């Protein structure tokens, strides 16, 4: 039986505070999952995908994508929205030059959806991949 998660409002991964957390009440107590925790799961799944150089900031500065340090990537490169018992994840990535962008993006969607659903036991409604740039690998 799937957990009966409730989402009291809308929040994103930047705040990670009370409003917008997924909660489940059981006879033993209450479980709360913040958007930040979901963003961390999604970020880890993205960074393991072939062709991904790293996460990017959501905003472009002077038309340039900024590659985030791995410790910042789950906060700034992922946006999680919890709306009406649905999880919507927006990912901002930089992909390796020379790879097929559509295939890498498709793999990211599948990987994130699988890993988050496996960890939470809750279906992910949408995974949106925003390719912020391409990077030539150093060989």
Image (cartoon, rainbow, N blue to C red):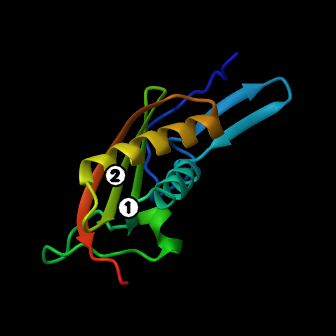
The answer to the question of whether label 2 and label 1 lie on touching residues, with beta carbons closer than 8 A, is yes
Residue 36 image-quadrant placement: bottom right
Marked residue nearer the N-terminal end (2 or 1)? 1
Is 131 in front, or is 10? 131
Give me the residue at 72% from left, 27% from top: 25
Label 1 crowd (10 A; few <14 / some 14-19 / many >=20) = many
Q: In which quadrant will I find the N terminus?
A: top right
Q: Regarding mark 1 in the picture, which secondary structure is present there?
A: loop
Spatial CA distance of label 2 from label 1 is 6 Å
Image position, residue 53 (x, y; %): 38, 69
Image position, residue 83 (x, y; %): 41, 32
Image position, residue 65 (x, y; %): 24, 72
Q: Residue furthest left?
A: 62
Label 2 crowd (10 A; few <14 / some 14-19 / many >=20) = some
Q: Residue furthest top?
A: 1
Residue 60 against residue 29 in the figure, above or below: below
Is 3 in front, or is 28? 3
Q: Residue furthest bottom?
A: 139
Which residue matches tag 2? 104
Which residue matches tag 1? 51
Residue 109 image-quadrant placement: top left
Q: Which mark is residue 68?
A: none
């Amino acid at each position: 039986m799937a957990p009966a998660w409730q989402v009291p409002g809308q929040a994103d991964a930047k705040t990670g505070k009370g409003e917008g957390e997924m909660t489940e009440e059981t006879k033993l107590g209450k479980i709360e999952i913040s958007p930040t925790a979901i963003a961390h799961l999604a970020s880890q799944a993205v960074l393991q995908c072939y062709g991904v150089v790293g996460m990017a900031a959501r905003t472009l500065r002077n038309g340039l994508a900024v590659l985030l340090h791995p410790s910042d990537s789950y906060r700034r490169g992922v946006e999680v929205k919890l709306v009406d018992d649905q999880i919507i994840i927006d990912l901002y990535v930089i992909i390796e030059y020379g790879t097929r962008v559509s295939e890498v993006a498709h793999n990211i969607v599948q990987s994130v959806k699988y890993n988050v659903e496996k960890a939470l036991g809750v279906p992910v409604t949408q995974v949106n991949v925003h390719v912020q740039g391409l990077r030539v690998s150093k060989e």
